[in-house]
């Protein structure tokens, strides 16, 4: 493999029902940083039905080129068909790097592509950089329960691949005047490439803001003592702030709230403007999911709780007293 033939940092753009996922923009921003260091271009690969209009938004967020596979057959995500499209793309365009969001779809797609192309994949990365040689990507990911950070490289194979956690990198500002090229591609697929069949889409988690997308998260832990605060006190505070309710694993394991709300290493990684941790001790596995928050506010009875080491504002006290007072005060300010 002549490594010099492989060029371009490519983001596999993820869309759902005609809307680009935030992680696609976060990856473009980071791809741009890597590309500027290497002296390379950023490409996006966009797959779906009627998705061409989304290409401009990818350009506005940092893509120099957008390759569009717009095909009715690709309306719903399909592991084998999408992987075939991307592997064919690789053989035609010879990319150096593929960045994939570590979403349910990306975690399914990434390993299949890497295996088909016989290349290296680092899963669930939280850091991306360029090695001293100026061309190899250094993929950083937490390992062994978040106790070590592993730096992994793929020196001999291309593309260099990684899935990257959502909400680790900030979404770049859109530049409406950004110019880029939109290239229409044709997916070469036969029925045999669709090894799974889409039957029905069932939406989970009900209505309301998802924690991955929320600007404010009010999270509860074991200190909440039961399920009620998650639909009562914590939700009231989240509602006045236009946010969502999160939880520690202890709260989820106790059955107080659905696992879709779990923040942390085995839950979601979130990056809100404000994260309010109520009755959460601040275990390393929890911090792994929320330390990218702009501002952390901790409410805990124990002044020695580790969460106070990472918070911007801390209140030592009983969350059952403090949270309702906070909600009332914010309501008053908002009028
Ligand atoms: C492999 C692995 C993966 C994991 N993944 C995750 C993960 O994704 N997310 C996660 O959260 N954890 C995860 N954990 C578990 C993690 O190690 C902790 O056990 C967990 O985060 C503890 O949750 P907690 O802070 O709610 O509970 P505790 O650690 O029990 O803390 C409860 C806190 O509430 C405070 N408190 C009690 N009553 C009140 C009150 N009335 N007002 C204010 N404060 C009060 C206490 O002082 C205490 O600090 C993982 C563990 C392992 C081993």
Image (cartoon, rainbow, N blue to C red):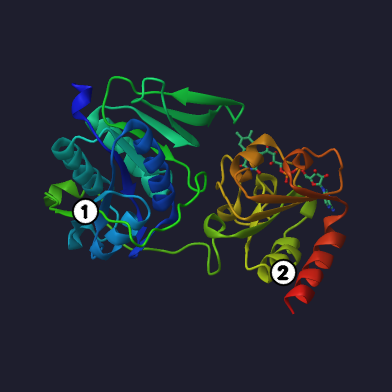
Q: Is residue 283 positioned above or below 21 on the image?
A: above
Tell me the quarter of the image containing the C terminus. bottom right
What residue is shown with label 1? 181
Q: Which mark is on residue 279?
A: none
**Residue toward you, 316 or 36:** 36
- Residue 236's tag is 2
Q: Residue 223: horizontal and vertical position, in percent?
A: 79, 50
Q: Position of residue 312 (x, y in %)?
A: 74, 47
Task: Specify few, some or many for label 1: CA neighbours under 10 Å numbering under 14, 14-19, or 20 or more.
Answer: some
Q: Earlier in the sequence, mark 2 or mark 1?
A: 1
Above or below for 259 versus 72: above
Residue 308, how many percent across, how many down? 78, 42
User: Measuring 64% from the left and 37% from the top, which residue is drawn there?
Assistant: 285
Instruction: Residue at 65% x, 45% y: name it.
Output: 249
Tell me residue 230's x, y (percent): 70, 61
The CB of the residue at mark 1 lies under 8 Å from ligand 1: no
Tell me whether circle 2 and circle 1 mark residues in contact (CB < 8 Å).
Answer: no
Disc 2, SS: helix
Residue at horizontal 55%, vertical 68%? 208
Tell which residue pokes out farthest to the bottom in this image: 335
Q: Residue at x 62, y 55 (%)?
A: 273
* In the image: residue 242, left or right of residue 308: left
Query: How many C-alpha atoms fall within 10 Å of the one at disc 2: few (<14), some, or many (≥20)?
Result: many
Q: Nearer the viewer, mark 2 or mark 1?
A: 1
In this rendering, position of residue 60 left or right of residue 229: left
Quadrant hosting ligand 1: top right
Label 1 element class: strand
Q: Is residue 220 left or right of residue 8?
A: right
């Amino acid at each position: 493999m002549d490594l010099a033939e492989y060029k371009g940092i490519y983001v596999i753009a993820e869309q759902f029902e005609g809307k680009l996922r935030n992680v696609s923009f976060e990856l473009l921003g980071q791809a741009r940083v890597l590309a500027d260091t290497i002296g390379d271009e950023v490409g996006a690969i966009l797959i779906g039905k009627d998705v061409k209009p989304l290409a401009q938004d990818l350009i506005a967020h940092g893509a120099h080129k957008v390759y569009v596979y717009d095909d009715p057959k690709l309306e719903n995500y399909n592991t084998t068909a999408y992987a075939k499209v991307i592997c064919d793309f690789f053989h035609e365009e010879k990319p150096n790097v593929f960045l994939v969001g570590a979403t349910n779809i990306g975690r399914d797609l990434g390993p299949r592509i890497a295996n088909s192309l016989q290349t290296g994949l680092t899963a669930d990365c939280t850091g991306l950089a360029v090695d001293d040689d100026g061309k190899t990507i250094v993929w950083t990911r937490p390992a062994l329960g978040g106790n070590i950070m592993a730096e992994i490289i793929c020196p001999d194979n291309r593309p260099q691949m990684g899935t990257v956690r959502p909400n680790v990198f900030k979404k770049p500002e859109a530049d409406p005047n950004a110019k880029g090229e939109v290239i229409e591609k044709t997916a070469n697929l036969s029925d045999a490439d669709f090894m799974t069949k889409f039957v029905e889409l069932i939406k989970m988690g009900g209505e309301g803001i998802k924690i991955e997308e929320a600007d404010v998260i009010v999270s509860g832990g074991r200190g909440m003592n039961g399920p009620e605060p998650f639909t009562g006190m914590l939700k009231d505070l989240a509602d006045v702030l236009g946010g969502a309710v999160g939880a520690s694993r202890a709260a989820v394991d106790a059955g107080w709230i659905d696992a879709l709300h779990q923040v942390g290493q085995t839950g979601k990684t979130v990056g809100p403007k404000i994260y309010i941790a109520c009755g959460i001790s601040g275990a390393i596995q929890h911090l792994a999911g929320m330390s990218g928050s702009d501002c952390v506010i901790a409410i805990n009875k124990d002044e020695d709780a580790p969460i106070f080491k990472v918070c911007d504002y801390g209140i030592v006290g009983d969350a059952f007293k403090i949270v309702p007072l906070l909600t009332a005060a914010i309501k008053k300010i908002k009028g």
